[in-house]
Image: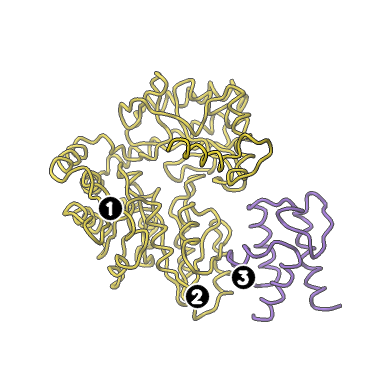
Amino acid sequence: MSDAIETAADAHTPAETPGARDLFSKFDALINEREAILAAGVRDPFGIVMDEVKSPTLAVIKGKDTILLGTYNYMGMTFDPDVVAAGKKALDDFGAGTTGSRCLNGTYQGHMEVEDALKDFYGTSGAMVFSTGYQANLGMISTLAGKGDYVILDADSHASIYDGCFLGDAEIVRFRHNSVEDLDKRLGRLPKDAQKLVVLEGVYSMLGDVAPLPAMVAAVRKHPNCMILVDEAHGMGFFGPNGRGVYEEQGVEGDVDFIVGTFSKSVGTVGGFCVSNHPKFEVLRLVCRPYVFTASLPPSVVATAATSIRKLMGAGEKRARLWRNSKTLHGGLRELGFTLGTETPQSAIIAVILTDQTQAIGMWQALLELGLYVNMARPPATPAGTFLLRCSLCAEHSEEQVGQILGIFAAAGRAVGVIV
Amino acid sequence: MTDRQSIFDSVTAQIAPFNKKGATLSDSTTFAGDLEWDSLTVMDFVAAIEDEFDIIITMNMQAEIETVGQLVDAVAKLQAEG
């Protein structure tokens, strides 16, 4: 038996033959690039392990206390005592997992409670919870826009939006990032009677810039048969009077048909959702494949999410702290001489723009050695081929920590030669 | 000059600013191979072509277009439909 397996494995493994090709050959360039970087003694920016997580803002990485500045844990809910208690209770009462689809055996009382919490938070009649934010976009876009329909998306859209397009059968049209004119022009060239889904994001996650939603909505409304979906993954919790997102802050609530969001940022756990007032919204539960053909979230996760969402409704003080932190860091980094993704602090994401991969990795590693973790981002994830270090702030970063962060940036920036 | 030739000339004029390698342009020139364009360049270029001819080249269509000649034919077809 074991002989047979070995023989079978040999037959499919050409790795020993020089120059042999198999399905992995297309990744050779990437493998070589990575090996060259790691051979130079650099730590792997995409292989960080958190050995211990002490708080929303502090973890132990390779034995060293490290300030976390790249987690999207905007509101610091991951260790909220009420949230953790709700998860433990659900784990005891309902077990570790549902082992089933939302449409079959995978809807528990907790899934209904988290959908109710979302309806209350967003003031909508409908809410649908997916197993991840990625699946929420995948499901909504691929299901809403079918054959003969059009999806119109911003060029800088998140991968989950692109993948939602590719999963569906609609025609895909993209416009230049945040360009109202470009969006308007493209809509004007599409068949008037075709159904169209325009997909926008409140905050774009690479540079942390915000969409000019009122102007974009006005441009869309000039054209017939358009519905608007806004992804508020990076806006939920701290934009707008109720923390609903950029669309609330900018006053276009009446014009947006669908809001997609995630539990893995401000809410502090994992999961995705869509909320809407559309009277036929519920039918999506039967026709949306990324909703139907996957297991639902574990009871502990939906319990933590529901508790967190309800607490976020009254989190005015945290919101104020998060904005204060964002402004302090943005201003401080500019003063040090760093080039940032936005002229002003527009969100809780601050992108430090660097010249190339060598500088980006050098700076990233220098920060890490000094006890600060940020995200490194590179093409194709980034717009316009940029290399950047993405910082995302947390309401729980103390003033002292923000000061420490600026000190670490100053030291690393000078050591690597990014600033003088 | 045929319509196709005039579209070919307009397309090659639009390629020029992106033709960093100075590749010779013919119907069989490929965007990925000969011009070595990455996805970002393709996006900028497609937007320029769309605006030049007042058409939409959907991403679905773009996936089928590999050569300059295929693009010229697609533009001709889209203009005829428009």
Q: Is residue A297 above or below residue A321?
A: below
Q: Position of residue A246 (x, y in %)?
A: 39, 54
- The amino acid type, in three-letter code, at marker 3 is Ile
- Closest to the camera, between mark 1 and mark 3, is 1
Amino acid type of the residue that numbered disc 1 sits on in the rendered structure: Ser
Q: Nearer the viewer, residue A180 or A297?
A: A297
List the residue tagged with mark 3. Answer: B56
Q: Which mark is residue A417?
A: none
* Host chain of mark 1: A
- Taking the image as shown, residue A217 lies to the left or right of residue A52, namely right
Mark 2 or 3: in front is: 2
Describe residue B42's horizontal placement relative to residue A188 as left or right: right
Disc 2: which chain? Answer: A
Which corner quadrant holds the N terminus of chain A? top left
Label 1 crowding class (10 Å Cα cut-off): few <14, some 14-19, many 20+?
A: many
Discs 1 and 3 carry the same chain letter: no
Looking at the image, is A169 positioned above or below residue A387? below
Dot 2 and dot 3 residues touching (CB under 8 Å): no
Nearer to me, A316 or A186: A186
- Give the quarter of the image for residue A124: bottom left
Q: Which mark is residue A296?
A: 1
Furthest-top residue in this view: A63
